[in-house]
Image (cartoon, coloured by chain):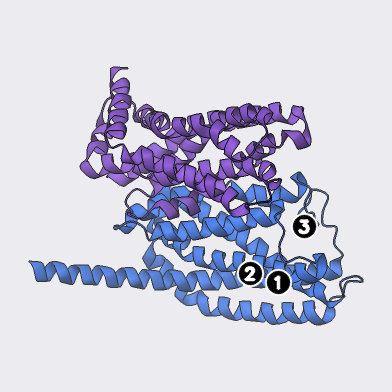
Amino acid sequence: MGTYLAIIKRDLVISYKDGDHIAMGFGFFLVIISLLPIGIGSDIDILPKVGPVLLWIAFLLTTLFTISRLFKDDHVDGTMDFMIMDSAIFEIIIICKVFAYWISITLPLIIVIPIMSILLNISMDLILPITFIIFISSPAFVFIAAVGSALTLGMERSGILITILILPLYIPLIIVGISATNINVIGINSYSVSVMLVSGFSMLSIALAPFLISLILRTNSY
Amino acid sequence: MISLINPTNFNKLSEKIIQFIGLFSLVLFIVGIYWSLVIAPIDYQQGEMVKIMYIHVPSAWMALLIYSFITLMSIITIIYRNPITVIAAKSAAPIGLIFTLSVLLTGAIWGRPMWGVWWVWDARLTSVMFLFFIYIGYILLLRSQNTSMKSEKIAAIYAIIGFINIPIIKFSVDWWNTLHQPASILKIDGPSIHSSMLYPLIIMFFAFSILFLYLLLLSMRIELIKNKIRAINQRRINDINN
């Protein structure tokens, strides 16, 4: 237990020391979301319909672009080999690292989503459901992106490649999540169904992704 | 038993059969194209445009078949580490990519007169586009690492992850309300298409698959020769350094 807590603490300390990383993810998120209202300009009625979709896309892109640092530094200086050889379970170490990433980068984004929703002219009663469903789906986002980060471990400019590789895996999640944010069109029943489906995806990804990631990282390390 | 499938045996066997396979594919294409263009009936609504089906549908089957082949080869690679399976998957990927591109393009050409649009974002078209991206991702991953053994294994894992897309493509027209036509051939109660259209379709499918076999064997032989050249160069560098 001590090992796992130590790894979470270590990753958090490294993230916060190099604060640029978190600020870049944050700034990327803000800039993407600001682009749409600037582009649409005067036709303010489109924004409530398009806004939730943009939140999902901005969230997705920020995750995909910032995740490449998750395993890279440890792989480069050899700590990854020690983690594999250690007596602690490597899959749980991976979960700890992804959890630390989630706290440092994804959680600030989720906290800021209500403010961004106001920027996007989304109606007030939709803000809490949208925030909640993005919060529930964030483990799935982060773990699937972590699989992509493990696949592209050795490469330098891997952000774009991760996007191409992993986007097909995200589509069920995005379809369910975005249909949940259209509650005013479909009706309140589909929201609870969508929340259940999305939380199912999240739990499935937490269960499966560490094994896939450990298989890929062990291949990378021999 | 898997060790019987090694590069030497493969080279000997493929040398003997590859010309026949190429010739057979050519014959099947001539028969299939003549049958489908001249003999097969035209549609009462679509007229002559329906003949695109004889390219579009077999290409689609080939795209899915080749991806399943790559997945199978990837599974065998991870379990048995046989060198031939890796080369087979590597060589099949560009062929599958071109077939997927052909499905998308012929579908768009067919859709413009029939549906009025070049493209819709319905379930089947979107999932076939994802197949296209997964092929591209697989080919890019193969070239990603410095040592080819590592990149082959990583690409194999990626191919297996991406296999989830194949049932989605197959059943997308059943599960969702799509613009694309529902399944009419591979159904539980048999094909619902008339035999005068079914037979040329099957002939074209065999023509495409024998063509795939020919191109695959050719690609694998070239890849084996490339490996030999790489090994010779490596030995020369080692000799110079020692």
Q: Which mark is residue B55?
A: 1
Residue B209 locus on image (x, y percent): 62, 68
Q: Is residue A175 above or below residue B58?
A: above
Q: Quadrant of residue A204?
A: top right
Chain for disc number 3: B
Say if mark 1 contacts mark 2, CB within 8 Å.
yes
Camera-nearest residue between A96 and A57: A57
Say if mark 1 contacts mark 3, CB within 8 Å.
no
Chain identifier for the blue-coloured part of the image: B
Q: CA distance from mark 1 to mark 3?
A: 16 Å
Residue B241 locus on image (x, y percent): 9, 67
What is the three-letter code of the residue carrying label 3? His
Chain identifier for the purple-coloured part of the image: A
What residue sits right under mark 3 in the picture? B180
Q: Is residue B37 left or right of residue A66?
A: right
Residue B22 locus on image (x, y percent): 57, 78
- Residue A96: in sight, yes or no? yes
